[in-house]
Image: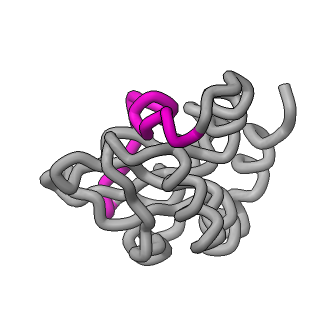
Amino acid sequence: MASNVLVKDIMSKDVKVVENNTSVQEVVEIMNKYDKDAILVVQSGKPTGIITVKDLLIRAVEAGTPLKAIIARMVYTNPLVVIEENATVEEAAELMKHWRIKHLPIVDKDGALVGMINDRDVVYSVPALMPTMEEFSRPR
């Protein structure tokens, strides 16, 4: 099943990011504007966390606090799981399966953000990995 496909070959380079102190209201606006279901939080160009739609629902909306009063670092998932750009798609799939995550930021050797992949990118680039991705996507 091994392929020579690297994550840098399939990653999206157009990653939307916000800073740690960005209001959640602005995060939601950016996600809506660009039709994203996840957005990365960065500090000094390096990813510090990720905010998904699920994070927003559980940590912001459910609490009932006005979204303008909450900042990104209060709702993001951290620690952040990342992978280096020269890793294989199989390595990425195993990491995603292990941590049960659907979005994986890609970093260079210095830890700077260079892109992101999601579970769909993995399946489309290496269809043989569909069983791996299905396994962690099923409800527990």
- What residue sits 30% from the left and 54% below the top? 84
Up the image or down, 94 lies above or below 66; here it is: below
Task: Please tell me whether residue 26 is drawn above or below residue 12 in the rendered image.
Answer: above
Image coordinates of residue 121 in percent, x first then y, are 61, 68
Q: Which residues are magenta?
A: 67-86
The vertical placement of 105 against 126, above or below, is: above
How many marks do you count on the picture?
A: 0
Left or right: residue 103 versus residue 74 is right
The rendered magenta stretch, by its main secondary structure, is classed as loop
Please tell me in which quadrant of the rendered image residue 130 appears. bottom right
Task: Tell which of 60 and 117 is nearer to you.
Answer: 60
Q: Residue at x 55, y 49 (%)?
A: 25
Q: Quadrant of the N terminus?
A: bottom right
Q: In which quarter of the view is residue 126 placed? A: bottom right
Q: Between 140 and 25, which is closer to the camera in this rendering?
A: 25
Instruction: Tell me residue 38's x, y (percent).
Output: 57, 54
Q: Please say whether residue 104 is one of the residues in the magenta stretch.
A: no
The image quadrant where one finds the C terminus is top right
Of residues 29 and 43, the one drawn nearer to the viewer in this rendering: 29
In this picture, residue 24 sits left or right of residue 43: right
> In the image as oriented, which residue stretches furthest toward the right?
139
Query: Any magenta on residue 71?
Result: yes
Instruction: Write down the quadrant of residue 18 in the picture.
Output: bottom left
In-image side of 70 versus 137 (left or right): left
Q: Position of residue 8 (x, y in %)?
A: 38, 71
